[in-house]
Amino acid sequence: MQRYFLFLALIGLITSCSSDIQTNTPAFQGEVDNVFFRANNSTAVLNSDGSVTIFGETAVELIEVTASSTAVGTYEFGTDSPNVAKFTTFTGNTYTTENDGNGKIEITGFEAGTITANLNFNARQPGVNDTLNFQRGIIFQVPIGNFTPEPGDGGGTGGNTDFAATVDGASFNSAMAQASENGGLIFITGVNSQ
């Protein structure tokens, strides 16, 4: 009887081990009005004025955060601030810190073509007395699409991939493009500063 118990325990131990390890790098996640948010796709773009815009998107929601610099430090959001956070809901409503909002992004790392930061903000929908709260935000090693490493710094692949399309009759030219695979689907994203 003891032999059978040891045999069953050994089988249970072997079958409970799994080599299915999943990573969450890059990551852009947090809580939107106390509901967990995790971007399926995240990327960042260096803007010509030295600022950085970080995008995180699900199939139906988009978050866009701009910090006036890539330097490690804290950047406050507010009505007259160059630092802005925007959140577009699945219904198409956009909340922004430009409209009596507040909060901050704390950049904790900028290296090898990626950016890492902590994020929280309160944003308002223009013309409506409605506030969206984004808290416990984590941006972890999000790739910067148009990052070009300095010679000898060993960072990233650099360069810029063109992506252009006509959307509702208007031309769209991306500042950067990125492709990723998730669950057998290929996602191609093109973003620009607008």
Image (cartoon, rainbow, N blue to C red):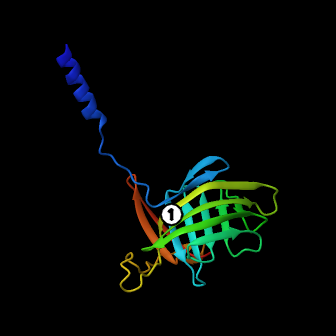
Give the quadrant of the N terminus: top left
Give the quadrant of the C terminus: bottom right
Residue at left offset 59%, top offset 71%: 73
* Amino acid under disc 1: Ser
Q: In screen coordinates, is 128 left or right of 140?
A: right
Q: In screen coordinates, is 129 left or right of 83?
A: right
Find the residue positioned furthest to the top.
1
Question: Where is residue 69 drawn, in percent x and y?
Answer: 59, 77
Camera-side residue of 52 and 39: 52
Q: In screen coordinates, is 132 left or right of 4?
A: right
Question: Where is residue 121 drawn, in percent x and y?
Answer: 68, 60
Question: Where is residue 187 drawn, in percent x and y?
Answer: 45, 62
Q: Is residue 194 above or below residue 28?
A: below
Find the residue positioned furthest to the bottom.
151
Q: Is residue 33 above or below residue 2?
A: below
Q: In screen coordinates, is 155 left or right of 2?
A: right
For residue 26, what is the image quadrant?
Answer: bottom left
Identify the residue under disc 1. Answer: 42
Q: In this view, does 52 lie above or below 102?
A: below
Residue at left offset 64%, top offset 54%: 135
- For label 1, the crowd category at 10 Å Cα-Cα, with few meaning under 14, some 14 to 19 and many 20 or more, is many
SS of the residue under disc 1? strand
Residue at left offset 39%, top offset 76%: 155
Residue at left offset 57%, top offset 52%: 37
